[in-house]
Amino acid sequence: MVITINDTTRIQHIKEEFNLLFPYLKIEFFSKPHHLGEGSPKMQITSENRTLGECRSKHNSGLIEIDPMMAVADLERAFSDNYGLNIQVFRKSGKVWLETTVTDKWSLKEQNAQGELVTQHMTRQENINAVNDEIQ
């Protein structure tokens, strides 16, 4: 997957493109960088209606190639180093989204597979509980 980066691209567009390839992952854009293994405060999340030009320090255009075998930390570093964009990857876990700070060395493919596994397991468990409640 290749994503075009320029000042007129909206954050929402990048998030949607990423989510098509990785349905159990999402990326959030932040106003400030974070260090490896650290999370970012929710209040620093940048609105998805903004353009990249409104929220980055490097105003060059280009492409980011996203490979499923790429580590989360490498993707976050590519956005930061090449385009001055502070992103963080989140993994779905049931009904909540977890920052992947502890597992930044996992590949995007591994992260997505783990999100799918946990979410499907929790959904099945909720369905079993609902049936049991109806029976009682």
Image (cartoon, rainbow, N blue to C red):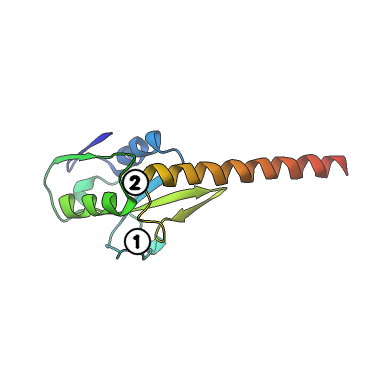
Observer able to see residue 55: no
Q: How packed is label 2: few (under 14 Cα within 10 Å), some, or many (20 or more)?
A: some
Q: Secondary structure at mark 1?
A: helix
Residue shown at the point (30%, 64%) measured from the top left: 34
Residue located beneath label 2 in the image: 48
Residue placed furthest toward the right: 136
Q: Is residue 131 left or right of residue 58?
A: right
Q: Are marks 2 and 1 in contact (CB under 8 Å)?
A: no
Q: Quadrant of residue 100?
A: bottom left
Query: How far across and how far down the image is residue 49, in percent?
Result: 32, 44
Nearest the eye: 98 or 30: 98
Distance CA(mark 2)–CA(mark 1): 12 Å
Residue placed furthest toward the left: 60
Q: Quadrant of residue 17?
A: top left
Q: Secondary structure at mark 2?
A: loop
Query: How far across and how far down the image is residue 69, in percent?
Result: 33, 42
Q: Amino acid at mark 2?
A: Glu
Observer able to see residue 3: yes
Mark sitting on residue 44? 1
Residue shown at the point (13%, 53%) measured from the top left: 58
Image quadrant containing the N terminus: top left
Residue shown at the point (44%, 43%) measured from the top left: 112
Residue shown at the point (27%, 51%) measured from the top left: 74
Q: How packed is label 1: few (under 14 Cα within 10 Å), some, or many (20 or more)?
A: few
Q: Amino acid at mark 1?
A: Gln
